[in-house]
Amino acid sequence: MSSRAGGRVRYAVVGTGARAEMFVRALVLDHSDTTELVAFADTNQARMDAHNRWLAELGHRPVPTYPAGDFAAMLDSERVDVVLVTSVDVTHDEYVVAALRAGRDVVTEKPMTVDAPRCRRILDAVAETGGRVTVAFNYRYNPLHEQVRRLLAEGAVGEIGSVHFEWLLDVRHGADYFRRWHRDKATSGGLMVHKASHHFDLVNWWLAATPVEVYAAGRLFFYGDGGRRHGYARGYERAHGSPAAVDDPFALRLDAHPRLRELYLDAEAEDGYQRDRNVFAPGVSIEDDMAVLARYSTGATMTYHLTAYAPWEGYRVMVNGSRGRLELEVTENDFVDRGTAGAVKGAALHGVEAPAEGGGATLTLRPFWEPPRQIPVQGRTRHGHGGADARMTGVLLGGRPDPLDRAATAHDGALALLTGLAANRSFETGQPVRVADLLTLS
């Protein structure tokens, strides 16, 4: 987003959970010459107050706070130019549409929304208003993923025939989706939407293609009721204050994380939301083991697998083409230490606390008739999603030039969402699902 009329762009953040912190820091520290944070909106005053305390620690003045029900009034009162949406996934469309109709642009966390009707609402509002929605697909900005994009666009493997994509969430990171609101598919869309939309967007972007048909199988194997079958279940509902959770490696200890304590434990009195549910307690309606077969507009296919209970964390991507094969393997953590398994990895820490476990990445090109070539990995870090967060905010908030034009539109957000929604439908029906039957895109 560029500066408006030579001044700083005025941003408001709606949804002040953990993920908002990355955007807030980018606004007030990294891009304060071009951006200005002017307001928070949320359903929970305690969370907004926590963010204002953290702003004070950064030397920034507190900003006005608004109940979520006063979102529209906030836009005018604070002369907001752009809204940053980091609320619970199922509410994204409410704020995106309201902002567009009030003449504001929007940057929204992924996924853009959680179902086809809400997606249609957003696309219709974009068409009606001419406003701009940018989806924060930070994986596009990972230097490794940029290398893959360039190699494929340059024809390193020729015409692409197929992609195999395996993503492993370890038993620290993966478990965290089953403690919080993500465990309810109605609010998150399940991991096919909330998590895998990142990966489906990457494949769309790498292939310059759109999904046509999806066939998938998924189940809840490990978490939820699976804990009793596999011998991991403990008899408590939430970890805080429970003796049964004291030595449970799957228990999140909120009081051991000052920021999480402020955002969630200290804020419970307002809305009753518990951030530290037992991952094996009843009420989980999402899957933890999912396999997908997708066909694309170019004729290429993708096989994809997401496991949310792995002993190590990382991913493998293999692209097969008419001139060879490209292989990317990333190890983010090679194991989970039992003593720190109850810590939080990812969004809540934003890479500030580097994991103790080992990691690394390799990128290998295997042309026909030639020995394989190791391609030097460029620019990867262990922080901020491989360095992607800072690069993304530099483009979206700082207005840095981007020759790869990575800013994802509402249309891009819809395409990534539709692969996951089609997979969810296939889970239910056991049949292949045509993407166009869920939502028609122009």
Image (cartoon, grey):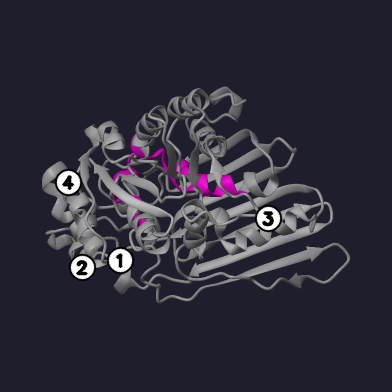
Quadrant, the C terminus: top right
Secondary structure beneath dot 1 equals: loop
Task: Give the mark nearer the N terminus: 2 vs 1.
Answer: 2
Q: Are marks 2 and 1 in contact (CB under 8 Å)?
A: yes
> Disc 2 marks which residue?
256
**Which residues, given as a range, are shown in magenta?**
175-202
Give the residue drawn at x 59%, y 29%. 435
| In the foreground, 74 or 67 | 74
Give the residue drawn at x 51%, y 65%. 386
The numbered disc on residue 45 is 4
Q: Are marks 4 and 2 in contact (CB under 8 Å)?
A: no
**Residue type at numbered disc 2:** Ala
**Residue 406 in the figure: left or right of residue 148:** left
Is residue 421 covered in magenta? no
Is residue 177 covered in magenta? yes
Residue 286, given in percent of the width and then of the height, sits at: 38, 41
Relative to 48, residue 409 above or below: above
Q: Could you give the CA–CA distance between mark 4 and mark 3, rounded to whole angstroms?
A: 42 Å
Please identify the quarter of the rendering in which residue 326 is found: bottom right
**Number of callouts:** 4
Of tags 4 and 1, the one toward the viewer is 4
Secondary structure beneath dot 4 equals: helix
**Residue type at numbered disc 3:** Arg
Residue 81, given in percent of the width and then of the height, sits at: 39, 41
Q: Could you give the CA–CA distance between mark 3 and mark 1, rounded to whole angstroms?
A: 33 Å
> Disc 1 marks which residue?
343
Q: Are marks 4 and 3 in contact (CB under 8 Å)?
A: no
Please identify the quarter of the rendering in which residue 142 is found: bottom right
**Residue type at numbered disc 4:** Gln
